[in-house]
Amino acid sequence: MNQTFTVTIDSTFYKILAELSASSGKSIQAILEQAIEQYRRQQFLEAANQAYIALRNDSEAWQEELEERSVWDITLEDGLE
């Protein structure tokens, strides 16, 4: 059984949640869970983008990345699916 916790939110946001719940037919809990998951994924992608930018800004590391990609590109022609 999952533990449950109480979270306090501003009344304005509770009203928005209630409206979303009414219009979608989903529970407030389901809406919050979906919003949290979407936020978690957004944070992950933003971190990945920042890491990619850092890689591109490091010319030596970027060159190593390009060399590794070219090695892996050979596997595209190996006839295996």
Image (cartoon, grey):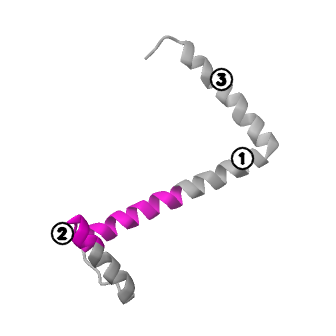
Quadrant of the image for the C terminus? top left
- The residue shown at (18%, 69%) is 1
| Label ID, residue 55 | 1
Residue ID for mark 2: 1
| Above or below, 23 relative to 73 | below
10 Å crowding of disc 2: few (<14), some (14-19), many (20+): few
Mark 1: which amino acid? Leu
Task: Mark 3 vs mark 1: give the one in front.
Answer: 1
User: Which region of the structure is painted magenta?
Assistant: 20-44
Amino acid on which disc 2 is placed: Met
User: Which disc is residue 22 wearing?
Assistant: none
Say above or below: 76 vs 66. Answer: above
| Pointer 1 local density, CA inside 10 Å: few below 14, some 14–19, many at least 20 | some
Q: Main secondary structure of the magenta part?
A: helix
Q: x, y percentage for residue 57?
A: 78, 48
Q: Are marks 1 and 2 in contact (CB under 8 Å)?
A: no
Estimate the x, y position of residue 6 in percent, counting from the top left: 30, 84
Label 1: which secondary element: helix
| Residue 71's disc number | 3
Q: Is residue 24 magenta?
A: yes
Q: In this view, which residue lies farthest toward the right?
A: 59
In the figure, 24 relative to 56: above or below?
A: below
| N-term mark: 3 or 1 | 1
When asked about the image quadrant of residue 38, the answer is bottom left
Q: CA distance from mark 3 to mark 1?
A: 18 Å
Residue at figure coordinates x 74%, y 35% from the top left: 64
